Image: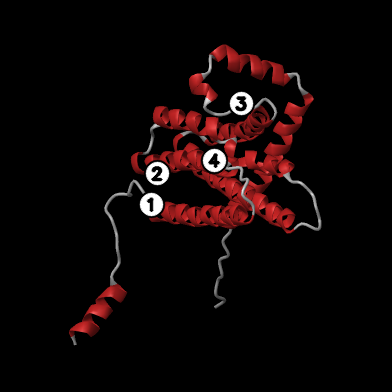
């Protein structure tokens, strides 16, 4: 029957392209999963709004900011897969990515806003909600780090890409410090005078807290990235004994 032939054709059909696509299905699938996680985080916030009128929407804004380096890394990785050796383009994308990358681990520091009252239901809801926001934001940051690292490895030498990778971790921690303690943000690069940024950076270098932020955030990102890399790369191959 015609329906049986159609079903058989669908089962045996294999989709292929002559050239690598600019946007891969694997990348889109990852983005879809992260969108779902972000929507779940917003759902937690909607519950909070329903039970308590005063709401701080900075969490949603910070979650949005964590998507900027993710999209930048996605574009950089997709372009390098499609067009190969594009060092200038990748450097520009990487600089843009680095400016916004600290927004991903920044949400860890939002846990400092927790007010502890063990007999109040909203205390536990806020704890779970803030943790989930921070977790999703970290996922965004780690996936963006993986994509941009893959792009570096395709365009630059292994040594150069490794140096860039390890350098961006403490720089991200330093960016978190500038955001939380110095109250700076990524947009300052655009609308603030260079002297304003340089003064804050130089002053921060003499602050012990800035070094603690940088080292500990770098350690967290490095460890979590190692776990992510191991999960993605780990393969088990079985061989048959003859």
Q: CA distance from mark 2 to mark 3?
A: 31 Å
Q: Earlier in the sequence, mark 3 or mark 1?
A: 1
Residue at 54% across / 30% down in the picture? 99
- Counting other residues with Cα less than 10 Å from the Cα at mark 2, is it few (<14), some (14-19), or many (20 or more)? many
3D distance between C-alphas at marks 3 and 1: 35 Å
Find disc 2 in the rendering and name its residue. 78
**In 3D space, how far apart are the residues under numbered discs 1 and 4 (Cα atoms)?**
28 Å
State the colouring used for the structure image. Answer: secondary structure
Name which residue lies at 67% across and 25% down. 182
Can residue 226 be seen here? no
Direction bottom: furthest residue: 1
The answer to whether the residues at label 2 and label 1 have Cβ atoms under 8 Å apart is yes
Disc number lying in front (4 or 2): 4
> Residue 14 falls in which quadrant of the image?
bottom left
Q: Position of residue 236 (x, y in %)?
A: 58, 65
Is mark 1 in CB contact (under 8 Å) with mark 4? no
- How far apart are the two marked residues, 4 and 3, measured between alpha carbons? 15 Å
Q: Which residue is mark 1?
A: 24
Q: Which residue is mark 4?
A: 61
Crowding at dot 3, Cα within 10 Å, few <14 / some 14-19 / many 20+, comes out as some
Measured from the top left, where is residue 175 in percent x and y?
63, 30
Q: Is residue 22 at all visible to an observer of this figure?
A: yes
Image mark for residue 184: 3
Q: Nearer the viewer, residue 167 or 34?
A: 34
């Amino acid at each position: 029957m015609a329906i049986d032939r159609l079903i058989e054709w669908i089962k045996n059909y294999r989709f292929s392209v002559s050239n690598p696509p600019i946007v891969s299905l694997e990348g889109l699938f990852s983005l879809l999963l992260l969108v779902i996680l972000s929507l779940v985080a917003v759902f937690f916030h909607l519950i909070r709004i329903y039970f308590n009128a005063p709401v701080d929407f900075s969490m949603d804004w910070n979650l949005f900011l964590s998507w900027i380096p993710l999209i930048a890394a996605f574009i950089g990785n997709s372009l390098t897969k499609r067009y190969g050796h594009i060092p200038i383009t990748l450097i520009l994308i990487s600089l843009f990515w680095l400016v916004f990358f600290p927004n991903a681990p920044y949400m860890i520091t939002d846990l400092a806003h927790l007010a502890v009252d063990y007999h109040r239901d909203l205390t536990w809801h806020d704890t779970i909600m803030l943790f989930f926001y921070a977790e999703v934001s970290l996922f965004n940051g780690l996936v963006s780090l993986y994509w941009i690292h893959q792009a570096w490895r395709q365009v630059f030498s292994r040594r150069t890409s490794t140096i860039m990778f390890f350098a961006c971790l403490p720089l991200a921690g330093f960016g978190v410090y500038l955001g939380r303690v110095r109250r700076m943000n990524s947009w300052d690069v655009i609308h603030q005078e260079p002297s304003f940024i340089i003064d804050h950076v130089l002053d921060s270098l003499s602050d012990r807290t800035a070094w603690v932020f940088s080292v500990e955030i770098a350690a967290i990102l490095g460890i979590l990235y190692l776990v992510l890399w191991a999960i993605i790369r780990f393969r088990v191959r079985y061989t048959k004994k003859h």
